[in-house]
Amino acid sequence: MFRRAFWFTAGAAAGVWATTKVNRQLKKLTPESLAAQAADKAVEAGHRLKDFALDVKAGMTQREEELNDALGLHQDPDHPALTDNVTALPGPRRTRALALDPHDQNTHRPKLSYNRNEDH
């Protein structure tokens, strides 16, 4: 008799435990819960992206300082002798476009031919 009572109680406890687990999993799969999980993941990804951007910016600043030191372009107020003789770097050069105007009659285009037999 005690054996039957023990196994009955053990079975009932296992049933309650399994039912609780299943209900928890079903609640995790509701649309509201899935939306909240997705929002949490998005916020977490945003924080990681922000940290990455700050790391990149710090690395850029450090590398810029290294390059300025190597080129002698110090912005340090402790070294006024170095900043007095620094001139601004020249701007980008403008190059003339190589394309010829199709409407210009004075432009002579060389006729280019390609013969595959010349390669052999």
Image (cartoon, rainbow, N blue to C red):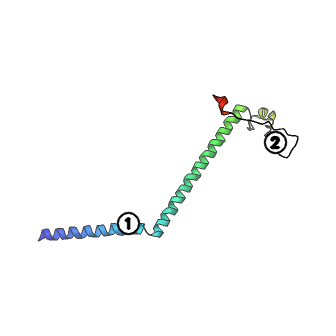
Which label number is shown at residue 60? none
Relative to the observer, which residue lies in front, 81 or 89? 89
Residue at position x 50%, y 62% in the image = 38
Relative to the observer, which residue lies in front, 81 or 74? 74
- Which residue reaches farthest right? 106
Residue at position x 25%, y 68% in the image = 13
Question: Quick one: label 2 or label 1, which is nearer the N terminus?
Answer: 1
Tell me the quarter of the image containing the N terminus. Answer: bottom left
Which label number is shown at residue 100? 2
- Residue 88 in the image: state x and y as whole percent: 80, 38
- Which residue reaches farthest front? 117
- Residue 112 in the image: state x and y as whole percent: 75, 36
Q: Is mark 1 on a helix, strand or loop?
A: helix
Residue at position x 57%, y 50% in the image = 51
- Residue 105's image quarter? top right
Residue occupied by mark 1: 25
79, above or below 51, in the image: above
Mark 2 and mark 1 in contact? Answer it, CB < 8 Å.
Answer: no
- Residue 85's image quarter? top right
Q: Is mark 2 on a helix, strand or loop?
A: loop
Residues packed near mark 2 inside 10 Å, few (<14), some (14 to 19) or many (20 plus): few
